[in-house]
Structures are given as C-alpha cells and as structure tokens.
Image: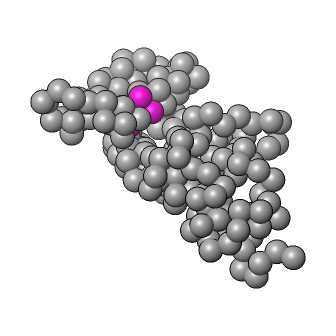
Amino acid sequence: MPRAGLAPATVTAVGAELADEHGFSQLSMGLVAERLGVKTPSLYKHVENLADLLQRIAVLAAVELGDALRDSLQGLTGRDALLAAAQTFRGFVRDHPGRYAATLGARATAPDDEYAHATARVLESLAVVVRSYGVLDEIHALRFLRSSLHGFATLESGGGFQLATDVDESFSWLVEFVDRGLRATAA
C-alpha cells in the first residue's frame, strides 16, 4: 500500500530538489528514498523507475521555466521583453541547475505527451519575444534566441566562464547583440 502523503508529484518534487542540490548526474532512487524517509522499493509504487522520475523532473522543469518566462513577459515587447526573458532563463538555470539539466536529455514520446506540452510553453514564451520584433523568419530567430540563452546559462552554471571579465557584463553584451540581430532581421 502506498505511504500516506507520498504521490508521484511529491517524489518528483523531491527528486528535482535533490538534482538541484547534488547535481543531476548524482540523482538516484536511493537518494530520493532517503530524503523521503522511505525504503527505495516504496518509490516504485509512485514512479516506474529512475528514467520515469527523470522524465517527470524534465516536465516539471519545463513547466516551471515556461511559467516563469510567461509571467516575466507580461506587457513587454522588443528589447524589454528580450531582457526579461534572458534574465528569467539565466536565473532559472542558475537557481535550478539539476532540474534544468533534466530537460537536456528528455524527449517527447508523442505530440500530446506531457513533455511536448511543457516545452511548448517555453518555446511559445520565447516566440512572443521574437514576434515582438517583427522578425520574418520566426523559426530561425527562435532557435538563435533559445540557443544563445541556453548556451550562456549552461556555461555559466557549469563554471565554464573562467576569464577575469565580469560575467554580468558579458551577459549584457549578449542581450545587446541578440537585440541588434533581431532588430536587423525585422520586417
């Protein structure tokens, strides 16, 4: 019988917290069970296996990032929207490195799968930024924006910026560069 108060959402939330604390690659069912105060086999009443838990964490992270982006963009357009999205994306990856890492290997298994819906929320928010510039080729611009934000945020959270130049200055430079690029390709 499943333990009272323990549910798939609880196991997922604890897994996400542990991924953020210890690193995504260090996450294990044993670590989750220990945090929840149960034996590892008890978790299998709530999630199928570690792969299922990791997919659930990826969905949770995509939903959280999508919601944070949507909320940060309310009423903003152009450079203001870009800056808000960039700061939100960077902050999410910095604050939740483990759960964001879960999204990197996750894949939707069908067009209506939870991960597909969750990532669509992220992409739609970023598309709002691109559309606010009036860019003609939205797909290429969206890929440019997403890869720029993802690349910067993951390099930063992984300690990849070792040069003495201030990282915040580099981030501002990136935002300005993306802004100029989007304005240059506008209709």
Q: Residue at x 66, y 55 (%)?
A: 29
Q: Is residue 175 visible?
A: no
Above or below, comparing residue 30 to residue 150 in the picture: below
Q: Residue at x 58, y 59 (%)?
A: 31
Which sits in the foreground, 56 or 132? 56
Quadrant for the N terminus, please.
bottom right
Q: Position of residue 92 (x, y in %)?
A: 43, 50
Main secondary-structure element of the magenta-colored stretch: helix
Q: Position of residue 116 (x, y in %)?
A: 72, 40
Residue most extreme to the right = 1
Which sits in the foreground, 166 or 118? 166
Q: Which residues are magenta?
A: 149-153
> What colour scheme does the image use?
one colour
Which sits in the foreground, 8 or 174? 8
Which sits in the foreground, 183 or 127? 127
Q: Position of residue 64 (x, y in %)?
A: 55, 55
Above or below, comparing residue 91 to residue 120 in the picture: below
Q: Magenta span has 115? A: no
Q: Residue at x 57, y 50 (%)?
A: 27
Q: Position of residue 169 (x, y in %)?
A: 18, 35
Above or below, comparing residue 66 to residue 165 in the picture: below
Residue most extreme to the left = 164
Horizontally, residue 39 falls left or right of residue 133, namely right
Residue most extreme to the bottom = 4
Horizontally, residue 138 falls left or right of residue 118, namely left
Horizontally, residue 163 falls left or right of residue 148, namely left
Number of marks in the image? 0
Q: Quadrant of residue 102?
A: top right
Q: Is residue 31 visible?
A: yes
